[in-house]
Amino acid sequence: MRGEYQQLVDEISAVFGAPATLEDRDFGLIAFGAHGGDDDLELTMDPVRTRSILQRRSTAAVRAWFEAFGIARAVAPLRIPPDPAAGVFKGRICLPVRHRGVVHGYVWLLDDEQLAGLDLGPAAADPRVAQAMETAARIGALLAAEARAGAELGELLRDLLTARAGGRDAARAALREGLGQSADGPLALVAVAPWRTDDGDGDGEQPGTDAPGSAIAALSGVAALCAVPGCLPDGSAALAALVRLRALTAPAPARAAADRLLHSPRAGGSAAAGMGTPRRGLAELTDAWAEALSSARAAAAERRLGPLAEWGGLGPYRVLTGLPQERAADPAVRPLLARPHTELARTTEVYLDCAGQAGRAAAALGIHRQTLYYRLSRVEQLTGLDLDNGEDRLLLHMTLKASRLG
């Protein structure tokens, strides 16, 4: 299907004699067309188009600027002026890609001198506009069909991940039938958390049912995507991405998928990703999901693990993420977690991370060793724990780590 998109984008490029770019509605690149030779392409590219092509996504500032002009609601082409502050140095002509009233993506043209006189009004006399919009409608139909197929697989994946033990066999069988041969190959599950499931586009879709643009899924080797509501301790949702691998020891496609999904507008600024241990087939998929979700929580709590944390590298967080949140804060340590003692808690955690080596800890904190000793004595007074006692140190260390888990 990728070839079909490229052919249609090339048609639009040929109609206007200008390079066109096709993105899905989450601004993930699907295809781009060049008019003329390589020199012409270089002359017509600007930083936004360059980034879109090379990194296959646009920045948040660029997306915000474009969306401010109502592109998600537009049914006809519209002009968008430049905004150097957002990194948009050249204006754009946007052709909305819709199907049955729903926006599925956008075709972009640079609004340069060549197209400056193009009439985009409702009664545009220029036949190129109507021809390009007819091609955009064909693209919309393809994206809609791909989205429907992806949504069906996503629903099957969600059924399996959320089914009770007694219903997992049926859910697994349905997903295996939907995936075909890839169901028995090496697979990895990626979790992105938190994931926004509301739909603010006003385009008539049912909130929470759609996954990221189909281009992201296809380009990253994703077999199925779904939002899993209420799976985080605070009741928010996470995204599950089932990724095909070439081998159990080659998780690169899953890492690439996580990177792309973390840049989706539906992943908030605090979102992190986690990956479970790759498995062959679907038999242990629910275990892989638990690992992926725990890894994402650990990545959010401990940024040195992220933005993508893998189950095998979590260390103590493999245990901590399995603890009920209400039991994670031991009563003895709880006073140290109060806001007035933030600096004491940080000092203690760094000291314990340094295996109790005062010199290393003082250097890491940028304080004098005597200051470190003074703070640690205050911690002992506050908690009643003895930092010379191995079990007390373990309790303190694990509780401090667990306190950051969301």
Image (tube, helix red, strand yellow):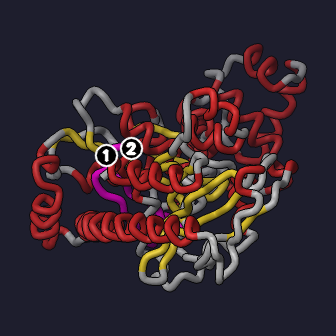
Q: Residue furthest bottom?
A: 204
* CA neighbours of label 1 inside 10 A, class few (<14), some (14 to 19), many (20+): many
The amino acid on which the numbered mark 2 sits, given as a three-letter code, is Ser
Taking the spot 12% from the left edge, 54% from the top edge, the residue there is: 180
Question: In the rendered structure, which segment of residues is drawn in magenta?
Answer: 220-243
Circles 2, 1 touching at the beta carbon (< 8 Å): yes
Which one is in front, 267 or 178? Answer: 178
Instruction: Give the residue at mark 1.
Output: 243
**Residue 390 pos. (x, y %):** 55, 29
**Residue 397 pos. (x, y %):** 60, 38
Dot 1: what SS?
strand
The amino acid on which the numbered mark 1 sits, given as a three-letter code, is Val
Dot 2: what SS?
loop
Instruction: Give the residue at mark 2.
Output: 220
**Residue 346 pos. (x, y %):** 75, 38
Is 240 one of the magenta-colored residues? yes
Taking the spot 64% from the left edge, 63% from the top edge, the residue there is: 94
